[in-house]
Each structure stands twice: as C-alpha cells, then as structure tokens.
Image: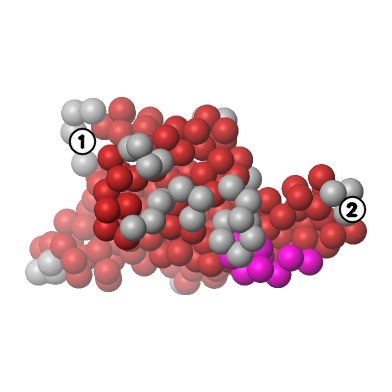
Amino acid sequence: MDRDALILSLQLAGWTVLVLLPLGIVLGRVLAWRRFRGKAVVEASLALPLVLPPTVLGYYLLVALGSASPLGQLYESITGGQLVFTFGGLLVASIVFNLPFAIQPMQRAFEGVSREVRDAAACCGLTRWRTLWRIELPLAWPGVISAIVLTFAHTLGEFGVVLMVGGNIPGETRTIAVAIYDRVQAFDEQGAAIMSATLLVVCLVAIGATFFTGSRIGRRQHE
C-alpha cells in the first residue's frame, strides 16, 4: 500500500474542493438565474472536461501551464520554479477538470429555488448576502453536497490528466491512481488490489454520505 500516494490524493482532493466550493456556488448561482449573451457558450466550455479525452485535456493543460506559456512564465518569475510536474500544477489541473462536477450540480440546485422565495426575502429586507446564506444555500444544499462529493471522488480517481500534467514523482505528484497503474505494470497484483479496494471504499463511503445527508435534508425540508 502506497500511503504517500493515498495521502497526496486526499490532499489534492481536499484542496480542489476548497477552491471549487465558493467558485461553484458563485458560478452555479449566476448560470441558474441570469440570462446573458453567450451563456450557452460559457456552459458548453465549462462542460468540456466531461467529453474531452483526459489525454487531450491533459495535453492542453500541459501546454497552458508549461514554461513557454505566459502563465508558466509568470509563475516561474514569482516563485522561481515551474508549474508543471509539481503539486501546484496538479492542483490547477484538478480544478479545471473538475469544473463541471462542481458547477453543474449547484446550478441545478439553484434552479430549483423558487424566484418567489427570493422575492419574499427581498421584501422582508434581507440583503443579497443574507438571502444567499439563510434562504438559498439551505434550499440548494443537496446540490452543494453532491458537488463536493463528486469533485472529491473524481479527483481521487483521475488518471490521464494527472499523469500528463504531474508526471509520476513520488511524494510530489504520484497519486493513488498512478500508483495503482505502476503496481499493475510491475505485475504486483496484490498491491494493486489493495490500493484499488482502498480507493473503492473511500469513494463508496463518500457517495453513501452524500445520499444519507441529502435524504436527511430532504426530510427536514418536508417536515
């Protein structure tokens, strides 16, 4: 069992969720309620990681984050190091390929919040921030929970993009998915089986917690 790879994967998933949670709430709310020119293009762009092959997405991210790119050069001028094949570059890639998993569930949840409820909150004198915090988020909470769990689980299982952008550096970019691949390549079936089972249990617990939390929230809202 490669514990370092598991810990790194959990750290990557945790940081990805922390970054995408507020971003998903803002973008999901905007896309749910606002109409603007080019909205379909924005939604299609955010959904691209769902349909693009991981190697294609990984290649474009590798080019966008590499030393020859403006972003890579800016990062190198600030930190003195490169962005690709580091945990920082892996985190940026993880944020990009998890955008639809974080935004779409929240968008659908906010779309389910009635406009009349928001109008009533405004009539009662609640500010937009208080309306979001006290009215909208509690009603959209099942979608938020789903987005968190989907993002977390998808980060743990992602292989193609991670290998393209981060490589296979022990303790730095080797995630548990890459470690499983290494064990299979080395014909270590027992090691691969143990890590695969661990990843299966972690993802199953995360998804089960989502359904449990969502059902409890649903019962409370109907009481």
Image side of residue 195 versus residue 55, left or right: right
Quadrant of res 35? top left
The numbered mark, 1 or 2, whose residue comes first in the sequence reads 1
Kindly report the distance in space between the C-alpha atoms of the residues bearing marks 1 and 2: 53 Å
Say if the magenta span includes residue 4: yes
- Which residue is depicted at the point 30% across and 33% down? 42
Query: Badge 2, how many Cα within 10 Å: few under 14, some, many 20+?
Result: few
Answer whether residue 181 is visible to the viewer in this image. Answer: yes
Height in image: 106 above or below 49?
Answer: below
Residue at disc 2, secondary structure: helix
Which residue lies under the disc numbered 2?
A: 189
Amino acid beneath label 2: Glu
- Which quarter of the rendered picture does the N terminus lie within? bottom right
Answer whether residue 104 is visible to the viewer in this image. Answer: no
Residue at disc 1, secondary structure: loop
Height in image: 144 above or below 53?
Answer: below
Say if the magenta span includes residue 138: no
Front residue of 102 and 33: 102
Q: Which numbered disc covers residue 170? A: none
Q: Which numbered disc covers residue 35? A: 1
Height in image: 176 above or below 133?
Answer: above
Height in image: 110 above or below 3?
Answer: above
- Which residue is depicted at the point 48% across and 44% down? 97
Looking at the picture, the colour scheme in use is secondary structure
Q: Position of residue 191 (x, y in %)?
A: 84, 60
Q: Position of residue 121 (x, y in %)?
A: 18, 64
Amino acid beneath label 1: Arg
Quadrant of res 123? bottom left
- Which residue is depicted at the point 31% across and 52% down? 75
- Which residue is depicted at the point 50% across and 66% down? 14
Query: Badge 1, how many Cα within 10 Å: few under 14, some, many 20+?
Result: few
* Magenta span of residues: 1-9
